Image (spheres, coloured by chain):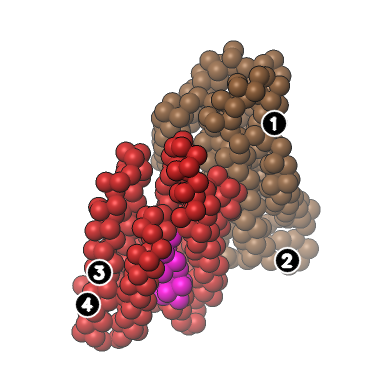
Chain colours: A brown, B red
Amino acid sequence: MPTDLSVFQYQLTLSFLNLTTVLMAGAGLLLILLRPKVGPAYQAAVSLMIVVVLMAALYYLRIYNDWEAGYAFANGAYAPSGAPLNNAYRSADWIGTVPLILSAMVLVLDLGRIKSRSLVTRLAGSAVAMIATGFIGDQQGDLTLRALWGAIAMLPFFYIVFVLWGELSRVLKLETVAVQGLFNSLRWLLLVSWSVYPVVYALPLFGVNGANVTVAVQIGYSLADLSAKVAFGLLLYAIAVEKTNDYAQSSPRQAEASLKR
Amino acid sequence: MPTDLSVFQYQLTLSFLNLTTVLMAGAGLLLILLRPKVGPAYQAAVSLMIVVVLMAALYYLRIYNDWEAGYAFANGAYAPSGAPLNNAYRSADWIGTVPLILSAMVLVLDLGRIKSRSLVTRLAGSAVAMIATGFIGDQQGDLTLRALWGAIAMLPFFYIVFVLWGELSRVLKLETVAVQGLFNSLRWLLLVSWSVYPVVYALPLFGVNGANVTVAVQIGYSLADLSAKVAFGLLLYAIAVEKTNDYAQSSPRQAEASLKR
């Protein structure tokens, strides 16, 4: 149920939505400009992250407009205008971008073609199942049904985290110390930023609501999206550059082989 | 006749229209970024698909705006605002993009210049005839006239599917196993996604209407467009990359000859 927001609460939310839009667009442009520094083997991974952040920027434009239309200023505060907010935008963004994020991650792991394809299929399939069941749960007015669908959505969530953590641990041993450090940051970033989503989803289950929660949900989702897309994308780019340079410093024959992968 | 939509029905439709816009734009950007991986012989085919998805993204922006203007929120539901929805947008999109999609497909078949030109002329001409007659049928209030024009539109539809299926079967034998598999996916994708359009067109003939059908038509067209453009474009890109790499691995003389085609 939408409640009145103070001018500060309303402006803070819109500012965060706009900040997120601009940082997504900025990160996309930066990665387009820096992409030539990455070797051919990692071009596809960086390209996927460029598409992810720019698609998210388009979504945040819509979410911003939706919020503007959802509230009207009257008597010193912002009251719901009557036009319902469209929470499906976020799910629609995620269902398109999360499989691409997971694919980009697999591409920088250098697992070989067959292994990569199998991993991408399993992870992307799980991601779609996770987001679809979470979306269904989010539409339920009944809290028991919300909890039930949320629990179902957590199964593919844990599967993704478990598989990626395992793959990363195995592959890490083959990399240089610098790349190991970057991958370690990447997996913690993934775990922490992804953990925000179920927490935000669970808030109504604990009876937490009101104006402050409405604002906190928008800011929480914005920060989680910035971590899981912008920070993740820049870290993935750093890994790609590091690996490109490692191969360039190794023998020409090795470098050639690695570029062909 | 437009009917009232629930908040969920309205938001789901707008979310799908927006998701389609974003995925079309995202696919266009991804193909622009990945295009250098494709040899000179297939640059034109990939470029055509980039133009197709970006043109479709612009159309979906219009369809989204049209829907926003077509409904107004009142008493807990979305009622038709009185401004009629413009169904001509989809036909206008198709009449521009379908001939380009068919041309792109012919270009990756490597049929030689004269054969390709003749095939493109026949297929593009049939596509224009199919979409124009389908559009005329869609404007008819009278169901008998709708059925009649629909039947006329099915003639070029079957001609296109028949010719492409035949050409693909003939050419497939000359390709590597990997390319054969991709072409096989491509023709099934074409057949299945194109089949959605006549089904949606025929719904009013069977007396199927109401709010759920209004929503299903928009979602059905969006999914069909995503399959016929985004999935088709990415698959066509995969074929182009596979064929480029095949030629690069053959002798330099062969590779040079193939790139000149």
Query: Which residues are drawn in magenta?
Result: B90-105
Which callout, 4 or 3, points at the residue further toward the start of the chain? Answer: 4
Tell me the distance, in whole angstroms, between the alpha carbons under discs 2 and 4.
55 Å
Q: Is residue B206 visible?
A: yes
Q: Which mark is residue A216?
A: none
Distance from Cα at disc 2 to Cα at disc 1: 49 Å
For disc 4, the marked residue is B151
- Which residue lies under the disc numbered 1? A241
Of residues B204 and B100, which is closer to you in this image?
B100
Q: Count neighbours of disc 1 (C-alpha within 10 A) and say few if under 14, some if 14 to 19, many if 20 or more.
A: some
Type of amino acid under label 1 = Val
> Residue B73, relative to residue A106: is it above or below?
below
**Image quadrant for the N terminus of chain B?**
bottom left
Mark nearest the camera among 2 and 4 is 4
Front tag of 4 and 3: 3
Q: Nearest to the eye among marks 2 and 3: give it.
A: 3
- Does the magenta segment cover residue B215? no
Q: Which residue is the extreme one toward the front?
A: B253
Are tags 4 and 3 found on a single chain?
Answer: yes
Residue B95 lies in the magenta stretch: yes
User: Position of A115 compared to A208: left or right?
Assistant: left
Tag 3 residue:
B159
Crowd tier of the residue under label 3, counting other residues whose Cα lies within 10 Å: few below 14, some 14–19, many 20 or above: some
Counting residues from the start of the chain, the first of labels 2 and 1 encountered is 2
Residues flagged by tags 2 and 1 on a common chain: yes
Q: Secondary structure at mark 2?
A: strand
* Total marks in image: 4
Q: Amino acid at mark 4?
A: Ala
Q: Secondary structure at mark 3?
A: helix
What label does residue A73 carry, if any?
2
Residues B4 and A260: in front is A260
Kind of residue at disc 3: Tyr
